[in-house]
């Protein structure tokens, strides 16, 4: 019966939502307890951080694998030129890598060039997300973060300012006050304030607009600047290529 099926689906959805909320409450309670333990430590320099072991990063292929042989052949020439199908930006990265310490790399490895976390660098990415509550039209604002080093990563979540306290402590544990800290985000005001105030003790730090929001802001500005759809597409292609 359609009515019974709809009722069972609604009941299952409510049960799933309740389980997710209960699980989230448990996680936040454990993280809050961990923050209190950190605050009670008399010597934070001796505190050991539990990180998820780092794995080899997965990069999007710079060009189709069938072009690898053509790239290898092009690199064998004294004045190598990019084969058709390889973008100028990818080719410049390949030439730069070949001129530096990666001169012995194969074309297959060069195909997957991408950004890497450097020794002595800690990267943190954070954002706000909305989690649907079991009640109709009720949402919970969650703040999530991911900290990554060359050794591993750690995920944080919570509400209000507690997760920012967690993030600051984790950055201190991973980077100290002298290593390089890179904070990625969407450019929100709360994130800028956090960077300027809470991270003020850190000597070397930077706040970067993450790639997703950077592209989205470029698209928004293109829509405001250009008069036609064709002009907007052309400007977006130029911006994304330069970036």
Image: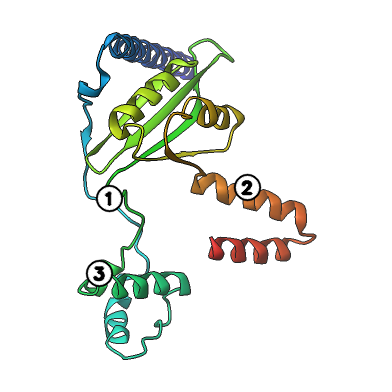
Report the residue marked by disc 1: 57
Cα separation between marks 1 and 2:
27 Å
First reached walking from the N terminus: tag 3 or tag 1: 1
Could you tell me which secondary element the residue under label 1 belongs to? Answer: loop
Q: Which residue is drawn at 30% across and 12% down?
A: 30
Could you tell me which secondary element the residue under label 2 belongs to? Answer: helix
- Neighbour tally class for label 2: few under 14, some 14-19, many 20 plus, Cα within 10 Å: some
Cα separation between marks 3 and 1:
17 Å
Colour convention of the picture:
rainbow
Report the residue marked by disc 2: 217
Q: In this view, does 3 lie above or below 100?
A: above
Circles 1, 2 touching at the beta carbon (< 8 Å): no
- Looking at the image, the residue that sits furthest to the right is 227
Q: Residue at x 34, y 34 (%)?
A: 147
Residue 48 position in % (x across, y down): 20, 24
Report the residue marked by disc 3: 102
């Amino acid at each position: 019966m359609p009515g019974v099926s709809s009722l069972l689906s609604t009941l299952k959805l409510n049960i799933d939502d309740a389980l997710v909320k209960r699980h989230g409450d448990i996680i936040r309670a454990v993280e809050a307890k961990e923050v209190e333990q950190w605050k009670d430590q008399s010597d934070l320099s001796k505190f050991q951080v539990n990180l998820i072991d780092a794995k080899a990063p997965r990069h999007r292929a710079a060009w189709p694998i069938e072009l690898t042989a053509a790239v290898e052949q092009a690199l064998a020439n004294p004045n190598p030129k990019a084969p058709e199908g390889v973008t100028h930006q990818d080719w410049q990265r390949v030439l730069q890598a070949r001129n530096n310490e990666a001169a012995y790399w194969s074309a297959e490895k060069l195909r997957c060039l991408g950004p890497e976390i450097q020794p002595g660098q800690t990267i943190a990415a954070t954002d706000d997300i909305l989690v649907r509550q079991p009640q109709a039209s009720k949402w919970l604002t969650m703040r999530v973060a991911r900290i990554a080093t060359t050794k591993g990563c750690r995920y944080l979540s919570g509400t209000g300012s507690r997760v920012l306290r967690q993030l600051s402590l984790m950055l201190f544990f991973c980077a100290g006050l002298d290593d390089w800290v890179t904070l990625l985000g969407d450019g929100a005001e709360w994130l800028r304030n956090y960077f300027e105030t809470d991270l003020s003790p850190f000597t070397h730090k930077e706040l970067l607009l993450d790639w997703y929001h950077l592209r989205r802001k470029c698209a928004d500005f293109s829509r405001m600047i250009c008069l036609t759809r064709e002009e907007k597409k052309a400007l977006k292609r130029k911006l994304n290529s330069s970036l």
